Image (cartoon, rainbow, N blue to C red):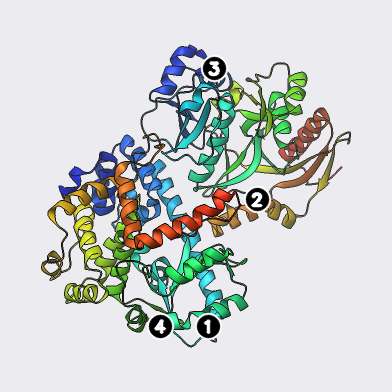
């Protein structure tokens, strides 16, 4: 029986983080995390609670560290830094921002190291065998919508940051991590989904207030299962607007997807073919929404139509 | 297998052995692969390692997870190589009215020559060399085609023009890579002044293009000069891998004696000596026949040799990926940095240059990045 992160006493978790590290199997990648920041163990225990713990030995795609910065400064203004393979790519952060720094750093490192996948900047979820890609355009409400979909219990979380596509099979892979919510979204999700497990709130970080939603057990258990992408949905939050779907031209969808990719240009022809196949085979929509409940209903129907094999249409 | 790698720290040994002896990867454990991929990534050698294993028919022996990372390194290279070819197409167009020779250097040359060793090798910029007397013409044509200097600052401009071996780096809105136009291969203020006119005159035409590349001997010497005369050696193992690849590529009857003769002409025997000390030792590079006796005559003293041996071994490979990034540079790295500056410019010029770079900072003025 494998042990889950949430079942391990915090002191032992802290010890393991500081020593060999904690291993996580995210689905598309294996990540090893090390840290000598004591408070990080509490936060990790909360938002990674359903992940089985992996021994830190063997091959990992990415090894990251969140380290305390030494020096006199640590007595009055403690700082931490993110390190990947002995390199510190960012300036130090205040020591209180440990989990957000770990998550931002992990995004950075995964983006740098995972050149074997096409990495779209998007949320990705699955329902009834239909993979849904929610490309991120700033202010689109992608993370909030992703959190709402999976908190409804009807959608499986793949990732709130990446649309990971296999260059060989064209299938969508999970890169399962906690969902990062910002500012007002934190309370919106907390109020609408009282069961959602939300970790500590980090106030006034560089990206505002940040908190993380723990992935549900079902998503964690299915993190090795890929899915065929079936719907590409461009969310657009608009305060007060009733939820509505709009068609989107495939060529425009193509350019929006590729501009929003972390490594599309680098991968060249295989990535072009993959995105072209995707816009050719997926239901493409823009979703304007002002209310999460309505948005979920609309997406439920879109998935049901897709599953029923109904012709691609707009009501 | 060579035993001279045994003196390296284990992570460096792992990388050097995989590069030099692809067959050896059969015996690696998952822990070894984990470390190797991290060290190779740090050394910017993932793509090179992938290509070397591929040529040796060893890719099938690489477990899936590390293989994906090796192939990712190769994909990164292919993208850069394409960016470079695209830039060179535009450059050839911009220089179509220039009747002088334009010599491609380093990565750009290897790509256009199609040298197998350079597959997977990363590069950030395209370097070309032209005769110093024709530099104004080149610059004028480039400016007319949208190339802009990266260093608009008057002092930086002066620094490059008076003391460097190249024009200030240039960029073009259409191209991702930077362009460096050289008139020689080492800073003109340095202790060694290669014969620039001969570099250009003896360059070899690349058939079907407007480009030339350095003669095989000069190509090797340029790589040696770049690593052991013009750099601090820190984490530059990939440049030693270049030297290894070039020597293996160009070696043949008479190459050793031609290389020695050419090194004498340019005054580059010492950098060549260092290259032929460390590349065979760590990468099993074959020393071209007839080269060693001539080089031994210019070997540094036993003391310098011992100091350099320990410093270069510590600096050339990236640190262990689990080592804490140091707050201050280790002593051996600082000594090598000091050495590279010492070799690059006389002390009076260094003092002047350091003052000029420090003044604006003292005044609190904001300026773009430094010239050196």
Residue lying at 49% horizontally and 37% vertically, measured from the top left: A29
Check whether the beta carbons of the residues at disc 1 and disc 4 lie within 8 A of each other. no
Give left or right: position of A310 versus B1: right
Q: Is residue B353 above or below residue A178?
A: below
Most foreground residue, B23 or B365: B365
User: Disc 1 to disc 4, how far (Cα)?
Assistant: 24 Å
Q: Chain of mark 3?
A: A
Label 4 Cα crowd, 10 Å radius (few <14 / some 14-19 / many 20+): few
The quarter of the rendered structure image containing the N terminus of chain A is: top left
Q: Is residue B128 left or right of residue A304?
A: left
Dots 1 and 2: beta carbons under 8 Å?
A: no
Quarter of the image for residue A19 reads: top left
Kindly identify which residue carries mark 1.
B137
Query: Residue B369, position in %: x, y?
Result: 54, 55
Q: Where residue A278 is drawn, which disc sits there?
A: 2
CA separation in Å, label 3 and label 1: 65 Å
Q: Nearer the viewer, residue B261 or A41?
A: B261
Q: Is residue A155 visible?
A: no
């Amino acid at each position: 029986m494998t042990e889950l992160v949430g079942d391990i006493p915090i002191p032992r978790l802290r010890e393991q983080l500081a020593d060999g590290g904690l291993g996580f199997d995210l689905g598309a990648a294996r990540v090893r995390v090390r840290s000598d920041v004591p408070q990080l163990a509490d936060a990790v225990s909360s938002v990674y609670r359903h992940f089985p713990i992996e021994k830190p030995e063997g091959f990992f795609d990415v090894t990251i560290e969140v380290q305390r910065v030494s020096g006199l400064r640590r007595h009055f203004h403690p700082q931490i830094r993110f390190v990947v393979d002995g390199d510190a790519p960012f300036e130090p952060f205040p020591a209180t921002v440990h989990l957000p720094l770990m998550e931002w750093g992990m995004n950075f490192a995964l983006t740098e190291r995972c050149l074997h996948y096409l990495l779209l900047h998007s949320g990705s979820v699955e329902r009834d065998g239909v993979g849904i890609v929610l490309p991120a355009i700033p202010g689109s409400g992608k993370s909030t919508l992703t959190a709402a979909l999976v908190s409804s219990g009807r959608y499986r979380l793949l990732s709130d940051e990446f649309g990971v596509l296999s260059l060989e099979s064209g299938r969508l892979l999970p890169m399962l991590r906690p969902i990062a919510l910002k500012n007002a979204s934190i309370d919106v999700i907390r109020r609408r989904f009282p069961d959602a497990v939300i970790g500590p709130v980090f106030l006034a970080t560089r990206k505002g207030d940040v908190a993380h939603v723990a992935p549900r057990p079902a998503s964690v258990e299915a993190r090795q299962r890929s899915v065929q992408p079936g719907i590409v949905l461009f969310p657009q939050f608009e305060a007060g607007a009733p939820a509505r779907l709009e068609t989107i031209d495939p060529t425009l969808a193509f350019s929006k997807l590729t501009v929003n990719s972390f490594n599309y240009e680098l991968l060249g022809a295989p990535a072009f073919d993959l995105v072209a196949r995707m816009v050719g085979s997926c239901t493409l929509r823009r979703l304007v929404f002002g209310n999460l409940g309505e948005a979920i209903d609309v997406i439920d129907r879109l998935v049901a139509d897709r599953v029923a094999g109904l012709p691609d249409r707009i009501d | 297998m060579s035993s001279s790698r045994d003196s390296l720290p284990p992570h460096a040994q792992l990388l050097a052995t995989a590069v030099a002896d692809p067959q050896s990867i059969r015996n690696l454990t998952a822990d070894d692969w984990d470390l190797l991929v991290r060290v190779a990534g740090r050394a910017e050698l993932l793509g090179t390692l992938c290509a070397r294993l591929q040529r040796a028919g060893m890719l099938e022996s690489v477990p899936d997870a590390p293989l994906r990372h090796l192939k990712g390194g190769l994909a990164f290279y292919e993208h850069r190589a394409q960016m470079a070819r695209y830039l060179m197409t535009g450059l050839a167009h911009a220089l179509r009215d220039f009747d002088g020779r334009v010599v491609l250097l380093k990565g750009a040359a290897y790509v256009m020559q199609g040298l197998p060793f350079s597959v997977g090798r990363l590069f950030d910029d395209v370097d070309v060399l032209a005769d110093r007397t024709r530099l104004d013409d080149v610059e004028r044509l480039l400016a007319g085609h949208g190339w802009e200097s990266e260093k608009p600052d008057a002092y930086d401009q002066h620094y490059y023009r008076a003391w460097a071996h190249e024009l200030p780096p240039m960029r073009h809105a259409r191209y991702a890579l930077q362009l460096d136009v050289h008139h020689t291969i080492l800073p003109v203020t340095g202790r060694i002044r290669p014969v620039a006119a001969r570099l250009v005159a003896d360059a070899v035409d690349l058939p079907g293009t407007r480009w030339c590349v350095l003669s095989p001997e000069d190509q090797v010497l340029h790589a040696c000069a770049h690593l052991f005369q013009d750099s601090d050696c820190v984490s530059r193992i990939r440049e030693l891998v270049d030297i290894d690849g070039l020597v293996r590529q160009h070696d043949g009857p008479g190459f050793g004696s031609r290389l020695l003769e050419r090194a004498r002409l340019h005054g580059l025997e010492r950098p060549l000596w260092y290259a032929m000390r460390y590349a065979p030792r760590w990468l099993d590079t074959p020393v071209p026949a007839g080269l060693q006796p001539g080089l031994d005559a210019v070997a540094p003293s036993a003391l310098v040799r011992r100091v350099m041996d320990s410093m270069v071994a510590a600096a050339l490979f990236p640190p262990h990926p689990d080592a804490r990034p140091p707050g201050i540079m280790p002593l051996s790295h600082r000594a090598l940095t000091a050495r590279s500056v010492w070799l690059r410019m006389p002390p009076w010029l260094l003092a002047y240059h350091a003052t000029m770079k420090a003044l604006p900072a003292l005044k609190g003025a904001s300026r773009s990045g430094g010239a050196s």
